[in-house]
Image: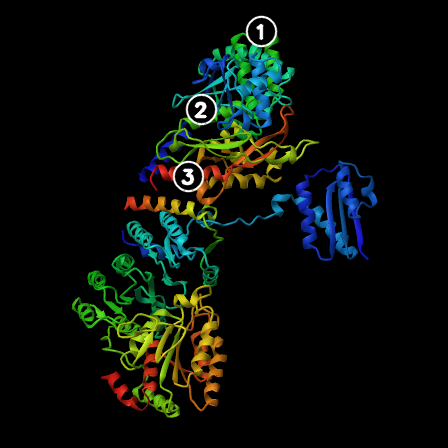
Amino acid sequence: MVVDLKKIKEQGVKAINIGIKDFYDSLKAQNVPVVHVMWKPPAGGKIEIFKRLKKLKFKKIEKSL
Amino acid sequence: MIDDMEKANREAIERVLNSEPILIGVELEAYKVIPGMDEKTLLHAGPPITWERMSGPLRGAIIGAIIYEGWASTPEEAEKLAKSGEIKFSPNHEHQAVGPMAGVISPHMPVFIVKNKTYGNIAYTNMNEGLGKVLRYGAYDDEVIRRLKWMKEVLAPTLRDALKASKEGINLREIISQALHMGDECHNRNFAGTARILIEFTKLMIDAGIEKQTMRKVVDFIDNNKHFFLNLSMAASKATMDAAHNIKYSTLVTVMTRNGTDFGIRVSGLGDKWFTAPAPVPKGLFFPGYSQKDANPDIGDSSITETAGLGGFAMAAAPAIVQFVGGTVEDAIRFTNEMKKITMARHKHYTIPYMNFEGTPVGIDLLKVIELNIQPVINTGIAHKKPGIGQIGAGIVRAPREAFEKAFIEYADKYGI
Amino acid sequence: MSVKKVVVKKNTFYDSSILMRAASEAKEKIEGVIEVAALMATDLNKKFLADVGLLIGEAVNATPSDLVIVAEAENEESANKAIEFVEKYLVKGVETVRKVEEVVETLEDALEKMPDANIVIISTPGEYAGWEALKALEKGLHVLLFSSNVELEEEIILKKYAAKKGLLLMGPDAGTAIINGVGLGFANVVNKGPIGLVAAAGTGIQEVTSIITREGLGTTWAIGTGSRDPTKDVGAITMIEGLKALANDDETKVIVIVSKPPEEEIAKKVVDVASQLGKPVVVNFLGASKELVNYIESKGLTPALTLEEAAYKAMAIVKGEKPPEKIVFTLKKDDVAKIVEKEVEKLAEQQKYVRGLYSGGTLASEAAYILKDYLKPLYANVKVKGVEWLEDPFKSISHSIVDMGAEEFVAGRLHPMIDPTLRKKRILEEARDPEVAVILLDIVLGYGSHEDPAGALIPEITQAKELAEREGRHLVFIASVTGTDKDPQNYSTQKSKLEKAGVIVMPTNAQAARLAALIASKDKWREVLDKMYS
């Protein structure tokens, strides 16, 4: 499906920022509606558990392609 | 395989939402109806456990049940028998049953029979003894045993006969829905549920022509125990969650329970395997004279209510008990909102007036618990760690993450990730 | 000497948690307050008061059903205010007073706060970034994936999934995008206009869109693809989806593609798609082979060799003019000659090398690509055909172009576009080298960049010039500023700051590089200038 840029134009940019806070600040400065996520690593920071969780999700999506 | 996960979860949660638990009867001899239970089996709350690892309240309840059954006449004899290995201990949950706190069900105790009208499966539960010194908190003195006998001889047959007078039994889903609108969350607060079930029983007792004196005693007994409905709320939850168990690939958590030593869960797609972690000690408010240091690690099958979208998950329905969660209604709402993040759906029958009749969060998704690191919240009574003292407070506890991690790893292994 | 005040309210019950909160807020908010307590007068609570010396006045005889409010302050007014605060707080109730700021810790939380969000910018560590991106796509959101170090396997799945769902997946490693006129990541404030970009190069987007805005035209969209997109593994999925999207966009009249040259197979694939869009397309594969340039032309597209050329060619097409054959300088040739003559005269005998210190990776590549035809041997830590590899990017040799945003420089510190520390140090190091004639710089403006990138370098530039002067040398500084007058740093202000410090500011990075080549050619500069124009 081709990306519908017109739809974005109609909605205007409404952003969520995950990670570096500066990007949130610069969107604020441009008067763009934006929510900043106080991100922390998923799965309580347990990397081995997280990796399997990630694999599961990616496998699922890959299957659907 | 993995595309099946979402399908499986859709089916599982559908079954949870469509379940309609009905109280259909009473059986005076538990072993006659409970599958896999013989005359030498004692059922208990929580995941499997040996006598050696049992905490005080559970040991006390086992001793009391042995005396009740007449297998021993003194606590010392009872303890000896319990240690001997002659008696089989088995978790309620492995027999379609649930019981609060120690949750002990012995072969000749009476049980309620709850049927899931939609799917036909049955759940069993014992009858609530009331507050104070009671078996479920590990008390086993004469008063306790006498009360249990009375329940067997008077209460249970009366309620059995009353239920026989009804065509379809008592619809527990309806009562729970109403109780939520009347300030219960159906785990730590059961005022409304108890009042409602008492009205239903009273009507049926009249229809059944129960003798006036007996009826009066039964009505008083139920009326004096504001937790009488708890066991039925639990059995309704059990009948509901069992209908969604054993669906291949589903990550729905169908059981959360504690035996005073371990906390355990079961997951729909992982069959009958238990995933356990040490039971946490609840934090809460204590009755005068007791404090945190007296508290036993968490105990009871009653967290089946949270598993089915009640209790801590419906905290915002019960403003009267918000002291347990921080003192304000807002705190209660926050708990309910937090639980939304780890559940699969909003309940279509169980709703919260205070939140514009939003459904309670229901159907814990193992994957969401793992990803978001949010532990399910459980409302709970607090037992004294010594047997026989009883309830010393109430509060909340968080289901330990470790049990969910173990289940997740099993899931990943089983389904080849 | 402090003042103590007490109020007892008979038979008035409040829950302890509310009382505690009221007292703590009073203590926090009212100046001059030393201690505030509000509690039911149980024996235990009275003991607490006695312990802090506040069991005074009426409180002594209060009963457990009485509420006691006590305040100790530096003066009477503060003490009264504190008591008044608690009284008001209790009447208003908790709900209205306490506003709990909801914690937004996940994408789901954010969506609850902004259910109609349509794009997510992700800059978490790479191992988590793919996961967050996947969740965003699942929820139907476009994604700018700023993070690098996302696994290749994940990138491919993400891009295919995004393409299937009709969503933009820009990145990983995409620093810049312009979406409906809004700059995401590192981006300049540009005009809206008829030119759309798809680019695998962050500062490439910034340079092209800035030139277009400074020339009075504008940009519709700039879709960053991430550096790994135009490879055989990924197959330029984002680039191709971006092109299709721009083809469908009515406001985009001309499309510009910017990238380092992809592998041939992919380059041709992109060109083939581009030739089917029904819109004029300018293709800048920086450093493309002659063969590839021919292929682009054979498909009816317009090749451009540099970023500035891409910008000018696209603008000419928009205006209905014939695109310029090539751009050498936008200044008059004579004026360039005057500048060069003046500078060359001042150079000392041993001065001969150009040292480019770059914050923008694509700009560094462009400079190396231009200089390689005139200066030899030329070293760089960016891969450009015909340029030697600079083994140790911390030490220049001969003519060198250094991308200071390369991994070795940013490990454990911020990108040089944000933090100028390393570049400042490096300017002085280069100045001490007696063989250096020209220091070439890029100044990148826009959101995300340093608030005053020119100003930050000027002390070192001045110092460097003085240092050379003292040793009888003349150090030439040449810079270009990537940005616009709408940028928070302001293009004109930045430019004049540099000029005041004696820096020659050229209109584009490409022209800055060419001027550097001319000056470093010293007495041969006229020949070189003619060669440029030939």
Q: Which mark is residue B94?
A: 2
Give SS at disc 1: loop
Residue C274: % across, % down: 22, 62
Q: Which residue is nearer to you in this view: B61 or C252?
A: B61
- The amino acid sitting under disc 3 is Phe
- The amino acid sitting under disc 1 is Glu
| Image-based side of B10 in relation to B332, left or right | left
Which residue shows up at 57% across the image and 48% down it? C100
Q: Which residue is nearer to you in this view: B265 or B365?
A: B265
| Image-based side of B65 in relation to C64, left or right | left
Which residue shows up at 78% across the image and 57% down it? C75
Callouts 3 and 1 on one subunit: yes
| Image-based side of B93 in relation to C17, left or right | left
Residue B213: % across, % down: 62, 8
Q: In the figure, residue B185 lies in which quadrant?
A: top right
Q: Chain of mark 3?
A: B
Residue C78: % across, % down: 75, 55
Look at the picture and state if B176 lies above or below C215. above
In the picture of the structure, the residue carrying the numbered disc 1 is B211
Residue B12 visible in the picture? yes
